[in-house]
Amino acid sequence: MIRLEKAGSTVSPAADGAKASPANVRVDLPLIKIRAHRPWAAVDLRELWTHRELLYFLIWRELKARYKQTVLGISWVILQPLLMTIVFTVVLGRLVGVPSGSIPYPLFLYAGLLPWIFFSSAVTNGSESLVASSYMITKVYFPRIIIPAAAVGVRLADFLVASVVLIVLMRYYGIPLGWPLLLAPLLVVHITLLALALSAWLSALNVRYRDTGTALPVLLQLWMFASPVVYSEALVSARWRWLYELNPVAGIVEGFRSALLGLPFNRSGLIVSVLITMALLVGSTFAFGRMEDEFADIV
Amino acid sequence: MKPIVSVRNVSKRYRVGRPLGMRPSLREAVTNFVKSPFTQRNGEANGETLWALKDISFDAQPGEVIGIIGRNGAGKSTLLRILARITKPSKGEIDIYGRLGTLLEIGTGFHPDLTGRENIFLNGTILGMKVQEIKRKFDEIVAFSEVERFLETPVKHYSSGMYLRLAFSIAAHFEPEVLLLDEIIAVGDLSFQEKCFEKMRSVSREGRTIFLVSHNLNSIQSLCKRVFLLREGRLCAEEEPQRVLDIYLEDKPPALINS
């Protein structure tokens, strides 16, 4: 607990006495330094940690409010990937006949759609999040990156709920649960960080340029077909594989599917994906830190 | 005595060039960049600048209640927003020893579909309280706000008075070392207002520092020991309330004391 001594008192508490603190200012109090804008500032991670409860409550608020408002509530989170799976199974599995190897196509599809839907909805929500939260940004201080992080967190919760269906499907199709499954959580962390990096960057851009989100749905649609979501990476010819793997989502989706369904891993694709994600994360931390000072003035 | 808040030569500049409603577009920025990638563009060239605050310096001691008055556009809210860290100063430095509580508006982040109980935790964390702290003060907050019976009701069904009382009560039980208040003390009916005033006096007696922006000169006079008068972004008087209020009401050009 933080408490000041009564005004006028000149005695420091014994615990602080050794440090010869100035009267009336406890040494355990944080010093807040407010300085003019610096163009090269990354997001302060330590400060982010001290505000972790706020992150939790913002995610909690969205989830709680959503399940109070809509009758479908939680079921929509499961229905969306399920309906997409049915549609793609009919169109691509039956009519076109996309090969999925030894794995039944619906299961193959669901295992790819699950991380993709998480990623694309997190980026969509995240990029709009700062502008949507302008009423908070202009009224109180907190590390601004919590806003896009909370948007991603909400979608992560949806993803975890929808994963239950995947387990059910795997049981239904008789896929054994193997050791590679333990890699899945790591891949979830990986795709979360990638979604966070893009969300932070796009949300900050969106504050300054309101047309940032206009092209996003189309771009995400293209991105989905440039990733091995509805088809296997094996269909991409070896000559262009290196270019294909520059898409960080490709390595993650393929890796996620391998971990769950016991398929062989594409190591080089995963490594490239990790490197690109890290670069994006560092870049977006600086881009965000550079732009966040002016959010309240222009939002 | 060491000041708890120390403000040195703070200025804030706003750009006022762009016509209202004309936001820069990404498409525009990208095309400009492609056309001439090496031109520096930071918007300062095309647009006037306005100094909302000019060279403000002062110290505040623990336990002080400082009123900030001035006409519309004098820079009161800008000063508060800079102290609150919502926006950054263009120049100058500020040091604050302790936690900061900002109340520019009550009920920031309240969600209409959540209950009173849920909103206490939500709003409390947004203000900067720890969950442990909210739990400890929960009963006090509820008692002060007088909404016990409606704790499990979504706040969208609250009357405006109940809503305001709950929101103020959460904020009043946050115990930061420095509290920034903007025009929000006139909340609820007369008896609740008196309760709020009493709460602020006790906050000050505990050694916390309050900054209070208000157009209500009565509340300024009854609560503050020192009053700042801002005029066109400058701090033009800094004295005990009665003298500053006289200057403000007569509106004669006072001597600049902070040059």
Image (cartoon, rainbow, N blue to C red):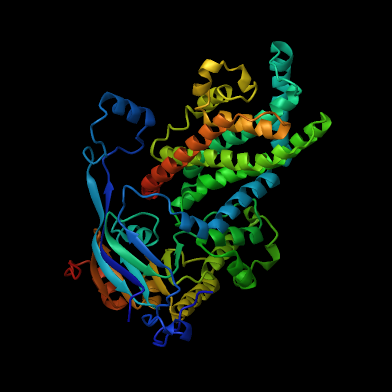
Along the line of sight, which residue is nearer the eye, B222 or A75? A75
Residue at 54% of width from left, 68% of height from top? B189
Along the line of sight, which residue is nearer the eye, A168 or B247? A168
Whether residue A36 is visible, yes or no, is yes
Whether residue A73 is visible, yes or no, is no
**Is residue A16 placed above or below A61 in the rendered structure?**
below
Along the line of sight, which residue is nearer the eye, B60 or B167? B60
Along the line of sight, which residue is nearer the eye, A95 or B88? A95
If the image is split into quadrants, where does the C terminus of chain B sit?
bottom left
Q: Position of residue B188 (x, y in %)?
A: 54, 66
Q: Quadrant of residue A160?
A: top right
Q: Quadrant of residue B120?
A: bottom right
**Is residue A286 placed above or below B249 in the rendered structure?**
above
Residue at 62% of width from left, 47% of height from top? A62
If the image is split into quadrants, where does the N terminus of chain B sit?
bottom left
In the image, taking residue B154 as reference, residue A148 lies left or right, namely left
The residue sitting at the top extreme is: A95
In the image, taking residue A119 as reference, residue B232 lies left or right, namely left
Q: Position of residue B186 (x, y in %)?
A: 47, 66
Q: Position of residue A241 (x, y in %)?
A: 53, 21
